[in-house]
Amino acid sequence: MPTDTRRSAPPLHPAAAPRPATSRPHGKARSPLAALVLGFFLLFFALPVLWLVLAATKTDDQLVHGDPLSFGSWQALRANWEALTAFQDGAILVWLGNSALYAFLALVITLCVAIPAGYGLAKTEFRGRNTLLVVTLIVMLMPNATLVVPLFLELNAVGLIGSMWSVILPYSFYPFGVYLAYIFFTTALPTELLDAARLDGCSEFGVFRRVALPLAAPVIALVGFFGFVANWTNYFLPYVLLPTSGQFPVQVGLGELLNNVPQFNPTVGELAVQRPQLALATLLAITPVLLVFLFSQRFLVAGMLAGATKE
Amino acid sequence: MSSRVRWRVRAGHGFVAAYVVLLVAFGLVPTGYAIAFAFTDSTGAFAGLANFAAAASDFRFAAAAGHVAVYLVLWLVTLVVFVVGLALLLHRVTSRSLSRSLRFLYYIPGALAGSASVLVWLFLLDPAVSPAGFLLRAFGFDTFGQVVAPEHLPVLFTLIAFWTGAGGWIVVMYGALNTISPDLIEAARIDGAGAWQTARRVQLPLLRKWIVYMVILAFAGGTQLFVEPQLLSQASVGVAGRDYSLNQLSYDFAFRNDNVNTAAAVSVELLLVGLVAAGVFVVRSRFFDAD
């Protein structure tokens, strides 16, 4: 469950996917002002990421006195890695492992739940279908952080606080995924195809499994992408629901590290974390999402197009 | 009703059953819990609006609501102006690969959503280590403490939120611009409309529902401000950002003041804001009519 819709990747409505070349406007003479604005924002968006990558390769002294956009050294990177992994006996690795475990398990449940649900909403008629659709849309638009404190009260009542399921189960409730699957099956899966399978003697579940599911790869990827990013980047929910450091996902772990950086918290003693180590930890924390971004870009656009071209 | 059709209805229920269970368990039940707690006292007796009154009269409440309001105005205006502006500019870039690369690079900070973006910005806002330290010093800020002075926080949170969130919206807006028929743009051009005229009279009206969609989601999300002030208050040893937002206040009521009923009252208020925003949008926009 994303507690922060604003921060997680915003929903890419299939209809908004880029169309093929025909819909491009004619190019106009480029204006220097436009180039300037685009260039400025390129620096604004990209420079901090570049800086973060470089910061992890420096010593604290280099970070303060060196050129901000210079490479430090491999030795410093290695030293930072060793100091970081020494913090609380490799806590960072535990946190990364936790994040992976929570995000992955939740994703599996999300996919098993959301894809059939989207199919059911799109391709079957049953009482309560419209109500369910409207409720899904409303819940999907609501920022889920509103429910974090109430979720704590609920899970506390059933004794789940402190269990990893207290975050995995709420994560796996992902109405936006249901909505994406619903849109996909409505727009990209011809009902005639399903009827043909039914005539051939397929059961309702067989139609879903043998006809709809094999065609649904793009939307599975799409739901997987957004679900994974939302789970991985969630902060508020695990912050509230998981009490001990050994259970933190890396997002919450970063906060713990921050508490041990003397420049940000002068009360820490000799177990302090240096700033480049914090930068390295941040880099590690974002790497999985960054990789997903890089490698799924093409696939995602293809997936979104599959929905959009059928309208 | 033939048996085939009846079977299909049952299958429909089968497909959505697991989702409905999760929806009830993690959508409806917590909402019910919040409401139940908000209207009762610590003994479980009905308390009317006492918890809401207690929250509203807390010295931190009006301040937190004010902070969130100021932040929301700044954040929404920034988001609309720059996302739409940048999408329009990108749409006019003739080189497709350049346009695609720029969109992707603008989108990258989205990978840092959550606490990572706040940590990066803690560095960026510290004149001692920031790559933009010269800019900060040019504005007269020499220390981290000066930069994160309370009156700067709405701007800083807007910067962080924009940095992480805008790229994704630019991709969405760009996609929406692509759905506008090129004939329409061509017609406007033949009628003598320049870039500015075309944007104002053709593209912006057609983007309207997307902009509304973005504003509603960003508004509802913005009311939930938590991780930014929370980490900032850690980084400044509580000087800036403690009980800054309503969610932090709700958290503190529940876990520091041991007053879950008042915490629930704040949650219900936030829930109501989100619900109204989402409900109005779903009902009014007909945005989701896919049938």
Image (cartoon, coloured by chain):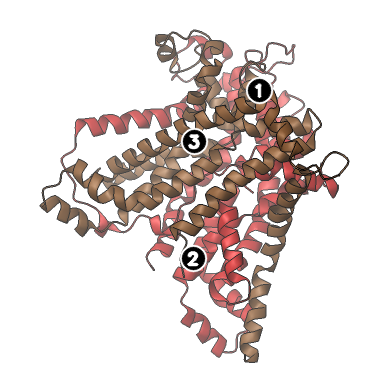
Chain B painted colour: brown
10 Å crowding of disc 3: few (<14), some (14-19), many (20+): many
The image quarter containing residue A18 is bottom left
Q: Nearer the viewer, mark 1 or mark 2?
A: 1
Chain in red, by letter, is A
Q: Amino acid at mark 2?
A: Phe
Q: Read off the residue under disc 3.
A: B164
Q: Residue at 52% x, 14% y: name it.
A: A63
Name which of mark 1 and mark 3 comes first in the sequence: 3
Q: Secondary structure at mark 2?
A: helix
Is residue A243 at all visible to an observer of this figure?
no
Q: Secondary structure at mark 1?
A: loop
- Left or right for A26, reference A169: left
Q: Which quadrant: the N terminus of chain B? A: bottom right
Above or below, B245 relative to A59:
below
- Which of the numbered marks, if any, corresponds to residue A184? 2
Q: Residues within 10 Å of mark 2 (few under 14, many from 20)?
A: many
Horizontal and vertical percent position of residue B258 = 81, 31
Q: For the residues tagged 1 and 2, is the chain the same?
A: no
Q: Is residue B166 left or right of residue A116?
A: left
Disc 1 and disc 3 in contact, CB within 8 angstroms: no
- Tell me the SS state at disc 3: helix
* Label disc, if present, on residue A306 of the rendered structure: none
Residue B260, position as x, y percentages in the image: 79, 37
